[in-house]
Amino acid sequence: MRPDGTRVKGLSPIVQALPYVMPRRFDAQNWASDTVDEDLLKTYIRRKRREGMSVTHMSVLVAAYYKAALENPKVNYFVMNRKIYKRNHFCFSFVILKTRADGTPDETTLKIFLQPEDTVFTISRKIKEHIDRNSVAVHNNNTDKFANFAFAVPGLARFVFWLAYHLDQYGLLPRKIIDLSPFHTSLFITNLASINTSYIFHHCYEFGTTSVFVCMGKPVPDPMAVPGSRKKHMPLGVVMDERIATGIEYSRFFAAFSRYLKNPESLETRLDGREEKPLLAARA
């Protein structure tokens, strides 16, 4: 048993065979494009801000993705060493830009763990807290510190990553390293709209356990809009590991994902759909 997941048993022969037919993640990558109604999303974000609540494009997308994943848990599976595992948590990774002390741009990668009781508001707060904490020029998070350590001695990085890769193959990589690694994640998401760039289809990393990568592109005019309309949509580039779920399972997941993006108000309560239990009145 791995620190981050449990092996899935009882799979059909064809599903069990797929990691042998396609042993590498880049062998099993499927690409798909989707769109988000930019006008609907911006209207929702502005309305929430007027109500004193901060939400962003990324927090809405992540909330919709997580809610759909709770209903379709196979998208949170991953393949390691030709075996399929059910992840025992949900997290997402993303890259932020920061500025070094000398003024040059730099990047750092963040990973955030979510819980079923999260909402779009708590996810937005977690994202902001992580970005604020890691945007300081002099600050290095634990992932950066580990990378700096690995590259401190010539030749050490090659050995460290070789060792980590092979320990991971056999489920021996320590939980602390897995928790630090942005490549061991349920979802990797990047917001290229923030730098006014078109979306791309970003590969899923062979190192780690990333099974789905979502890229947000800059909003563009909606080609399906009526002539003269200024309606826009945000394109998404999605790359997924086809070994973790069947076509119909992915179809159901993306149908739910799209449904929640069209109704962001549904993300304001617990994403697992359970009702909050009222606190019991204290006994006199």
Image (cartoon, helix red, strand yellow):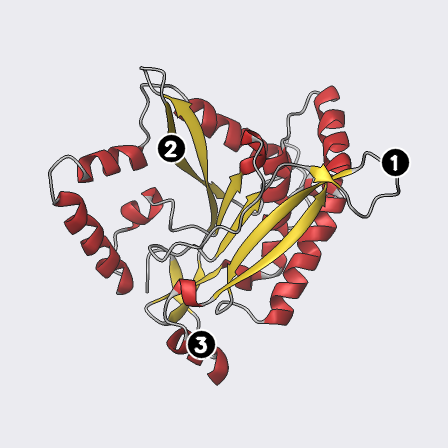
Label whose residue precedes the other's in the sequence (3 or 2)? 3
Q: Earlier in the sequence, mark 3 or mark 1?
A: 3
Tell me the mark number nearer the camera, choosing from 2 and 1.
Answer: 1
Q: In the picture, residue 156 is in which quadrant?
A: top left
User: Is residue 31 depicted above or below 8 in this figure?
Assistant: above
Left or right: 17 as drawn, with respect to 199? left
Give the percent coordinates (x, y) of residue 262. 76, 45
Task: Name the N-terminal-most of marks 2 and 1.
Answer: 2
Mark identifier at residue 20: none
Task: Tell me which corner region of the image, top left, top right, bottom left or bottom right, holds residue 85.
Answer: bottom left
Give the residue number, with chain letter if any, for mark 2: 108
Q: Residue at x 37, y 66 (%)?
A: 24
What amino acid is found at the position of numbered circle 3 in the picture? Leu
Q: Can residue 274 be seen in this view?
A: no
Q: How far apart are marks 3 and 1 (CA)?
A: 48 Å
Residue that sits furthest to the top in the current view:
102
> Where in the figure is residue 237, as x and y percent of width and height?
58, 50
**Relative image position of residue 197 (x, y in whole percent):** 56, 36
Local secondary structure at mark 1:
loop
Is there any visible trace of residue 118 in the rendered image?
yes
Residue at the spot of label 3 = 18
Query: Is 123 situated left or right of 224 in this image?
Result: left
Q: Alpha-carbon distance for marks 2 and 1?
A: 41 Å
Instruction: Indicate which disc residue 228 carries.
Output: 1
User: Are circles 3 and 2 on residues that touch, CB within 8 Å?
Assistant: no
At label 2, the amino acid type is Thr
Residue ID at (43%, 80%): 17
Circle 1 crowding by C-alpha within 10 Å: few under 14, some 14–19, many from 20: few
Q: Which amino acid does label 1 sit on?
A: Gly
Depth check, front residue: 159 or 83: 159
